[in-house]
Amino acid sequence: MNNDKLRELVAKMSVREKLAQLTQLTPICFGNDAFTQLTGPDAGLRVDKDDQPHVGSVLNCIGAEKVRVIQREHLNRNKYNIPLIFMADIIHGFKTIFPIPLAVGCSFSPQLAQKAARIAAVESAVSGVHVTFSPMADLVRDARWGRVLESYGEDPMINARFAEQNVIGYQGESIHNENSIAACVKHFAGYGAPEGGREYSNAEISEGTLEQMYLPSYKAAVDAGAKLVMISFNTINRVPMTANASLVKSKLRNDWKFDGCVISDYNAVGELMAHGIAKNGAEAAERAINGGMEIEMMSTHFLANGEELVNNKKISLQQLDDATLNVLKLKNDLGLFENPYRGISEEKEKELHLCQKHIKVARDIAIKCPVLLQNNNQALPIGENEKIGLVGPFAKSRHVLGAWSAGNTEGVSLMEGLASQIGADKLCVASTEELGSLLEGCQDIAMPNITLLKRKLAGCKRVIVAVGENQNDTGEGASKTDLHLTQNQMKLVSEVKALGKVVIAVVFSARPLVLQPILENCDAVLQAWFLGSESGNALADLLLGNISPSGKLCMSFPQCEGQIPVYYNHMRTGRPQQAGNATRYASRYIDCPNEPLFPFGYGLTYSECSLQNLKLEFDKQLRLSVEITNIGSRKCTETVQVYIMHHTASIALPAKELKDFAQAELNPGQTQTVSFNITQQMLTYILNGKNVFETGKFSFMVGTNSENCLHAETNISQEQYECMERSQYDINT
Ligand code: GLC
């Protein structure tokens, strides 16, 4: 249907029918309790019979059969034959579950996100999904917040590249293709900066930090063609985003030319009253619509008050028509008018869901995400023929998918992964049940039974202690102030150490935990995250040395909660702490170092690499090159990272910022030269929506993490800048 036809359709609709088209509900609101999955508070929302046929979209109803039934019933009652659009949270896979996004960010391989998103689209489209509320592009710095798991960490460039690749993966060549789904980037903007790390609290972000740190990832998703943008719960500059015309209309619509659909978050329109900027539902609807909201998710203030708002000229009919047209355009672009059942196939569900091809990709991705944080005396990898101890709450656990796993619950456990490769007879499993009752719901253990532990582990030199945080303590509504492992888990680590074993901690978590207390009792520590369907198999591949770990932290690990927020791209200070200078009057703590326990970009391999011969050459282009040599005894993949600091500019800028990275796969003894083309955009900062270059001295820091780098510096003139290559990411292009 062309746009004229769509406009004709809008013109036929009554105001109330348009308002219903802008409303998104779960089937529970139609009385279909069986067909729903609530992801927010159930306010007992129900819509009456004569409005139901005109509701525009459905939230979190998935499954070919269910969607077909609801769509058919709807079309039988909608007098314009306008199909429903089905939207869902497909965050890191649909049936084949991939590692949580925070883990995938540690792969430093954005193309893996595209691969995972493509499979998620193929698997969910056959189950009736048309839109996914992904990628989440919220930059995060505070591990107390439960939703850091959905983010790609603390760096703007990493978040931008991964958000972009997710959109490309979900949408493919066109969202009209039946194996594509539309991407909805979220949560615009700054939801990742809740004060105190406390869920849904205020975000205090300066204009400069918002522009340079938080907005680039949403823009990357919009530039990649995301069809929807979901607005965040938080306030920016004391205006709730759901009513923030300045950012939604002027930045998103006017500056970024976003022409897709803007959707509120769950009940966020109604929550403008709780924010204290609307005294009733009518004011909430007015503020939201004038703030640029088009689809109201899981509240009905538009429906209940829209007609009066139009009559009282609080909102214009044009706004309503534009929003309704946008929703119909999205349905049209998806091909839903031609075929309301586009893509749905019970047969293909059986053929595609968790098929071997997808499972293999899930394992290949999962292998790239764990981060080796410590490996003293080559405690890892484990030899094939030795007996291995395996203890702790995650030894046998299949609850390793991570939150937001689209209703799926189980993946391959660590025990299953190891046993499938070395045989169950090589494993001495002292699992939670034997060690003491599994304290229900908290994924913990009772105080370990040492006598039993000693007996069980008698034949083992090395013991894997599988610890971590309960998945229920992660995700939305799961902020916490204590990021330690539980006392019993820390006790288990020390008791196994006290038995004289080589201790290998494998940490299952959806956020950086405070691991400092266990380090002295561990010979090796592998940050496993939640790796999805193939968790146990991927971890076994790494622990047994089939492949070396290659992950690099995309989010810093704090020494303690008191350090939070701690991140690498922090601003400078007038009184920087100088190494070796214990003056009181410097930017420091008296009881903790400034540096995180493990910094952004950090991750060990089973080998060792050296960097040398850093060169900075200007010949029309500014090229940076460095040699990397594998001086260890095993093949490995290293990630060479380039950080840049602008020494002096009109505004204060971070001490360093990641501007490029490249991976090198090296055999023992092999040397590679890794080269980077420094583009204009890398030397700029963003101000008022533009890349700004200022001449002067620049430092270039190159390393395999953000702390230990080789340095080079040079002055760059305006004319040199003008000759330099422009990248596709240059905002001025
Ligand atoms: C939730 C989340 C959002 C999700 C939406 C629909 O409250 O904030 O990320 O997509 O509701 O489930």
Image (spheres, helix red, strand yellow):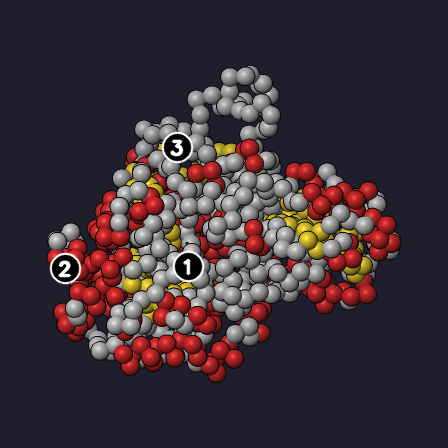
Q: Position of residue 477 (x, y in %)?
A: 48, 50
Number of numbered discs present? 3
Alpha carbon of mark 3 to alpha carbon of mark 1: how far? 44 Å
Please tell me in which quadrant of the rendered image residue 180 appears: bottom left
Measuring 48% from the left and 83% from the top, which residue is drawn there?
347
Q: Which residue is mark 3?
A: 653
Measuring 15% from the left and 51% from the top, which residue is drawn there?
314
Label 2 SS = helix
Mark 2 residue type = Leu
Alpha carbon of mark 3 to alpha carbon of mark 2: how far? 45 Å
Mark 3 residue type = Leu
Alpha carbon of mark 1 to alpha carbon of mark 2: how far? 31 Å
Sequence-first disc among 3 and 2 = 2
Please tell me in which quadrant of the rendered image residue 315 appears: bottom left
Q: Residues within 10 Å of mark 2 (few under 14, many from 20)?
A: some
In-front residue for pair 405/482: 482
Tag on residue 42?
1
Mark 1 residue type = Asp
Q: Position of residue 137 (x, y in %)?
A: 41, 51
Tag on residue 317?
2
Instruction: Mark 3 vs mark 1: give the one in front.
Output: 1
Please tell me in which quadrant of the rendered image residue 299 appears: bottom left
